[in-house]
Amino acid sequence: MPKVGPSRDMSSVPRLTPRSKKRFICFDLEGPLSPQDNAYELMKLFPRGDAIFEALSRYDDLLALEGRPGYEPGDTLALIVPFLVYHGLTEADIIKLADRAGLTPGAKGLVSRLGSEGWQVFCISTSYHQYAYRIAERVGIPGERVACTSLELDRFREILCQEDLRLLPEIEEYIVAPPGEAELKRRLDRFYWEELPATKLGSVVAEVKPRGGSRKVTALSEFGRAYGLSWADWVVVGDSITDFKMLEAVEGAGGLAIAFNANEYALPYATLGLASTSLEDLWPVLEAWEAGGRSGAQGITIEKEAKGGNGDRNHFHWLSGADWHKAVAAHKRLRRLVREEAARLG
């Protein structure tokens, strides 16, 4: 199994010229590379799992927005672990989902083209490692350039007994039929931050550190240090609340932060946006970035924005210093078209 995170073998790091430093790009996985939300699909493998996940996904948004200390966007992947164990799901189930998951149109083609042009392609994903490595492999990103969420689900199932799972039946019933959002949040706060930590189940859940929010920023920083890059050298592509801190860091440094079929949690932090049914529409902007840096990317983006999109393709918006709200309608429509059910999630 490839290591989670970047390689530390500095002897293999190439010498970089100023031009080659413009050939580093990092994709989020769910959205830009695959339309499927793997945790959502995993939860749907047991009865009412979809409803539970939708409620916990909203709870995740609320915790992230309120700025709960130590909580990161995407920590839903830790919140659902008790239910995965309780319903007997396995790591093999995650791998099966990855094998049959669709790829975002144009993702494999764009990654292939980038590689042939000398780009170094990375992926930082909140997804579990069993899923992230398999999808990355399918689009052509090597495992040593993937950072994701480690999950030892099979070990958890081995060390926990039914008594350790005694809290699950009651909280599951509450989640699927809560009296309201405010009441649901209060009940889940008590479950996750008071009741669960006092159990053995809580101790294994605490081991899971989803790669979202500031943990994505840390992973990108580690990749950058290995190759001698600054924040301004990166192109990053994201679409949701788990990506906004990474987008913000790169945009703030003068790099290129791209929101692809993004929601309102990501758009305000991006340099530019693309709403499209094909990721390959990014290629001209990436060419312009390599040749002319940020000003080159800005020029072609504004040119394409003025022309307007072509049906479901090429809806570009320059967002840096502009009103991001103008892009919302196109992104919402194309996000729903490409990601289908997963588009409802934050």
Image (tube, helix red, strand yellow):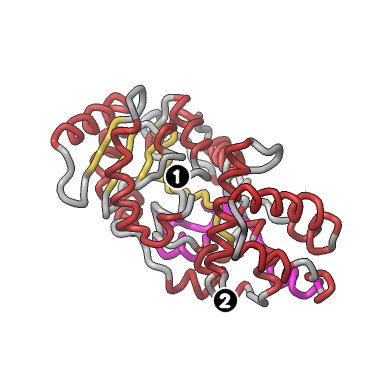
Using the rendered view, name the quadrant where residue 270 is placed. Answer: top left
- In percent of the image, x 57 and y 76: which residue is there? 47
Q: Nearer the viewer, residue 108 or 244?
A: 244
- In percent of the image, x 55 and y 51: which residue is there? 58
Principal secondary structure, stretch drawn in magenta: helix
- In percent of the image, x 77 and y 49: which residue is there? 193
From the viewer's perspective, tell me whether residue 196 is left or right of residue 210: right
Amino acid type indicated by mark 2: Pro
Point out the image quarter for the N terminus. Answer: bottom right
Cβ atoms under marks 1 and 2 closer than 8 Å: no
The residue pinned by badge 1 equals: 26
Q: Over which residues does the magenta segment extend?
A: 132-160
Q: Taking 128 as reference, is 318 above or below it?
A: above
Q: Secondary structure at mark 1?
A: strand
> Where in the figure is residue 43, as x and y percent of width and height?
56, 68
> Where in the figure is residue 232, as x and y percent of width and height?
45, 28
Using the rendered view, name the quadrant where residue 205 is placed. Answer: bottom right
> Where in the figure is residue 150, as x and y percent of width and height?
65, 58
Which of the two discs, 1 and 2, labels the residue nearer the N terminus?
Answer: 1
Amino acid type indicated by mark 1: Cys
Distance between mark 1 and mark 2 Cα atoms: 36 Å
Indicate whether residue 187 is drawn in magenta.
Answer: no
The label shown at residue 47 is: 2
